[in-house]
Amino acid sequence: MITTILGSCVSACMWDPVACVGGMNHILLPGRVWEEESVRGKSVNEMELLINAILKIGGEKSRLHAKLFGGAKMISHFSDVGLRNGEFVLSFLKTEGIPCEGQSLGGEQARRIQFWPFSGRARQKLLGRRDIPEKEIPDSQKDIVSEIELF
């Protein structure tokens, strides 16, 4: 079993049900630089690294399946980088012709993911919601806080 904890990040759990092999990654696209080619290329590389690792241990790309988790909007007053993370991974899978068998993307809670790569079984547990209520941010710091991405 492989496990991870996600907030705004997204994990793609991929497996080959015939070879009984698979793996998981953990992707985060930085908020304001999401459109930059170097950032997009890095994330494509993270997806390709996962696929290549599965192929090295006997999987075949044509038999891969995926399940996606994460992409939460962890702080309500900030941009939704989690949504962009989920959109990126869904787009990548579509382009590569890898079916997404299930997904739990978005929301406002972190998740603990457990994945069994030999079978494709996945389990998620939602974790306590974390947020910074606006009343806790002093007026003198609101402009500063609005310029950073928290995840």
Image: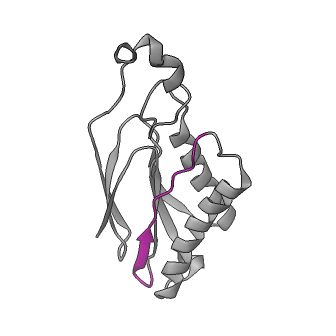
- Front position in the image: 120 or 127: 127
Residue 95: say if magenta. no
Q: Residue at x 39, y 18 (%)?
A: 137
x and y percentages locating residue 114 in the rendered image: 30, 61
The residue range painted magenta reads 18-31
x and y percentages locating residue 4 in the rendered image: 34, 58
Residue 28: say if magenta. yes
Q: Residue at x 46, y 64 (%)?
A: 25
Residue at the extreme front of the image, as rendered = 140
Residue 125 appears in the rendering: yes
Left or right side of 72 for 41: right
Residue 147, quarter of picture: top right
In the picture, the quarter occupied by the N terminus is bottom left
Q: Residue at x 46, y 49 (%)?
A: 9
x and y percentages locating residue 19 in the rendered image: 44, 85
Taking 108 as reference, is 143 above or below it?
above
Residue at the extreme right of the image, as rendered = 37
- Front position in the image: 41 or 24: 41
